[in-house]
Amino acid sequence: MGAAGSHAIAASAELTHRRGELGTEEQRKRYREEHPDELLPLAVDLSQEDVIDAMHKLAAAMRQIDATIYEYTWGRRALPNLVQ
């Protein structure tokens, strides 16, 4: 993945984990002043190659997850005892 894609992922993670703390323009301004190197641009340029690469990785993960979920829902595998 290119630099733009990496920046997009980092920005998404940063903003997601702040849980709306930067909801107002005043909060965003204060955060930019306190952390000038941490807040990435709100818009990034992604190449078609970056997007396709990310979608392939997502599809591979979903295939793995789907197979596991199927075993526990429609398959015959019992859920492990989660209460100990």
Image (tube, helix red, strand yellow):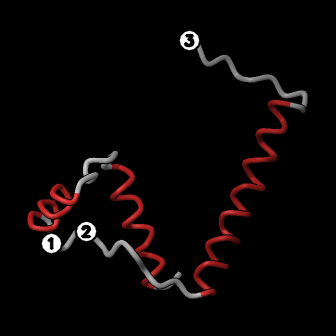
Cα–Cα span, label 3 and label 2:
43 Å
Q: Is residue 26 left or right of residue 51?
A: left
Tell me if label 1 and label 3 are in contact, CB under 8 Å: no
Which residue of the protein is positioned furthest toward the front in this rendering? 25
The residue lying at 40 percent from left, 76 percent from top is 43
Nearer the camera: disc 3 or disc 2: 2
Asked if residue 79 is positioned above or below residue 18 in the image, the reply reads: above
Rendered image: mark on residue 39: 2
Rendered image: mark on residue 70: none
Name which of mark 1 and mark 3 comes first in the sequence. Answer: 1
Residue that badge 3 annotates: 84
Q: Position of residue 23 (x, y in %)?
A: 28, 52
Residue type, mark 3 in image: Gln
Q: Position of residue 64 (x, y in %)?
A: 75, 53
Where is the C terminus found, in terms of image quarters?
top right
Q: Judge by depth and name the residue closer to the eye, 70 or 13.
A: 13
Rendered image: mark on residue 36: 1
Name which of mark 3 and mark 2 comes first in the sequence. Answer: 2
